[in-house]
Image (cartoon, rainbow, N blue to C red):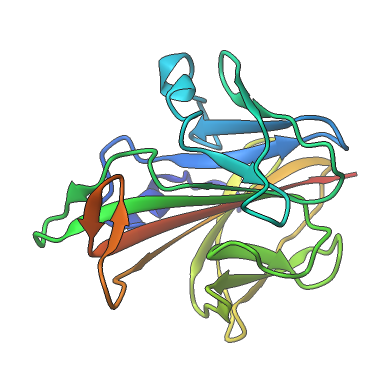
Amino acid sequence: MFKQSLFALSVLAAAVPAQAHQVWLERDATGPVRVYVGDADAEHDRGEEVAKLAATTQVFTTDRAQTAKLSVKDDHLEAAVAAPGDVRLVNDQVWKPWKAKDGKVQAAVFNARAGRAETRAVLDYELVPVAPQGNTFTLVFKGQPLADKAVTVITPDKWTKGFKTDAAGRIEVPVKDKGRYVLVSAHETEPANPVEIAGQKVQKLGYTATLTFVAQ
C-alpha cells in the first residue's frame, strides 16, 4: 500500500543534517518552473528558508551553463524557462558541508528533474524514463544504472510507497490517478579525491534525486 513517509528515505540518505528533506521541481505544461524545498509529501519551506537558496540554485534544461533567471516567491523559487520539455536543477549548498560521525567532511547534493520526455541522463544522479512519457525509469549515477536502490513514489494525493530498483536499475511506477507524481531517491558516495564545495574540501557526498511528472 501507498502509506509510508519519506522519513525512512531520509535516514537511508546517510548522516545529513536533522532538517533533511527534499528539493523538487514542478511545472504545468510550458509555464514557469517552481522550485520547492521541504517535505515533498507534506510541508514546504517558506520565507527566508526558500529565499536563501536563490544564489546557489541552478535551473536549466540540458545545458548547465545556460541557467534560468530565478525570482523569489513566498514558498518557492520561480524559474523563467522558455523552452518546452524537461527541466533540471542542481544545488550542492542547501546546507554547508558538515563533519559526519566518522570524522569525514560531507556535503549534500540535490538533483531534481521535472518531466519525462527525454530518455537521457544529464544530472549526476537522475531518474530517467526508459521511453518518452513512460512509467518505467532507470536510476542512473554518473552514467551507470544502480540496482537494488530505494526509490519512494508519492502519488497526487500524497500517499507514498517505497520501491527497489531491479538488476537493471529500473522501477515501474504504478500510475493510476491523474495529477503530479514525485519520485525520490538517495545515494551516498566517497569520491576518489576530495571535491571542493562552498570553500571546503569534502570527502563524502550524499545525493538526493527527485523527479516529478504530471499524469493526464
> Residue 17, how many percent across, how many down?
26, 42
Q: Is residue 48 above or below residue 12?
A: above
Q: Quick one: 130 or 33, which is closer to the camera?
A: 33
Q: Is residue 23 above or below residue 106?
A: above
| Residue name at image x 69 percent, y 35 percent | 157
| Residue name at image x 77 percent, y 51 percent | 86
Q: Quick one: 67 or 213, which is closer to the camera?
A: 67
| Residue name at image x 41 percent, y 48 percent | 92
Please indicate whether residue 83 sits to the left or right of residue 57 in the image.
right
Residue 215 visible (yes or no): yes
Residue 183 visible (yes or no): no
Q: In the image as oriented, which residue stretches furthest toward the front?
A: 65
Q: Quadrant of residue 116?
A: bottom right
> Residue 136, how many percent across, how many down?
75, 69
Q: Is residue 204 above or below residue 159?
A: below
Looking at the rendered image, the quarter that the C terminus falls into is top right
> Residue 24, how many percent across, how many down?
59, 41
Q: Is residue 150 above or below residue 106?
A: below
Please indicate whether residue 97 sits to the left or right of residue 167 in the image.
left
> Residue 105, how many percent across, how many down?
18, 56
| Residue name at image x 68 percent, y 56 percent | 63
Please indicate whether residue 136 sits to the left or right of residue 132 in the image.
left
Please indicate whether residue 82 sits to the left or right of residue 136 in the image.
right
